[in-house]
Image: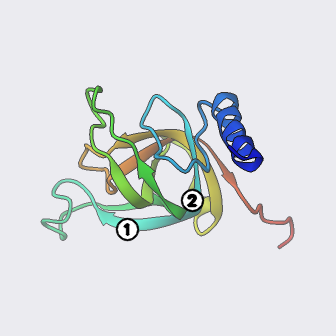
Amino acid sequence: MNTSLSYLLGLGLWLTIAFPGDHAGSTSCLPYEPDTVTIHGTLVLTKKYGPPNYGENPESDERLEIPILRLSHPVDICGDVNGEFNHDAFQNVSEIQLLFRPGTDYRHFSGHKVIAKGVLDQAIMSHHFTQVVMTVRTIKDLKPVEPGS
């Protein structure tokens, strides 16, 4: 085995050991909860129909503003065949709905490139609008706005 290949294999093993719970930039699939993952992209607020009929009767349905992270690069999501939920794997996921704690003000991130850290789940509720959702633990602006601009 040549030296370059040995070095790369060693580096990959070291990264796996050094950063076991944070899968940012990983070339493999991202895991569902309980593992914490980091994703980045542009936060957009998308209009969707909500209760009671989620678009079946637009005149009477609530209008929702849903935070969606448009990922910088598509990702693959690992399925969990042993879990009670999160069975399905997904490839080339380019958008993930972000779920925030009630009262969290995330609107000021709209249109910004952000980095979000949290846990992923497969969408199972009527108010989940993407195949995979993230319960956000932290979100940061990748390019903070300069004061006075």
Badge 1 is on which residue?
47
Where is residue 56 drawn, in percent x and y? 13, 65
- Of all residues, the one furthest to the front in this rendering is 1
- Count all numbered tags in the image, as a single digit: 2
Q: Give the residue furthest to the left.
A: 56
Say which of 134 and 110 sits in front. Answer: 134
The residue carrying mark 2 is 107
- Residue visible at 84% across and 66% down in the picture: 146
Is 46 left or right of 107, judged from the image as shown? left
Residue 83 location, quadrant: top left
Q: Position of residue 47 (x, y in %)?
A: 37, 68
Residue 23 to residue 49: above or below: above
Quarter of the figure with residue 22: top right
Q: Is residue 101 visible?
A: no
Distance from the alpha carbon under mark 1 to that under mark 2: 13 Å
Label 2 crowd (10 A; few <14 / some 14-19 / many >=20): few
Q: Residue at x 46, y 60 (%)?
A: 68
Q: Is residue 49 visible?
A: yes
Identity of the residue drawn at 59% across and 31% down? 21
Q: Which tag, 1 or 2, sits closer to the chain's start?
A: 1
Question: Is residue 22 toward the left or the right of residue 146 in the image?
Answer: left
> Looking at the picture, which amino acid does disc 1 mark?
Lys
Left or right: 66 in relation to 18: left
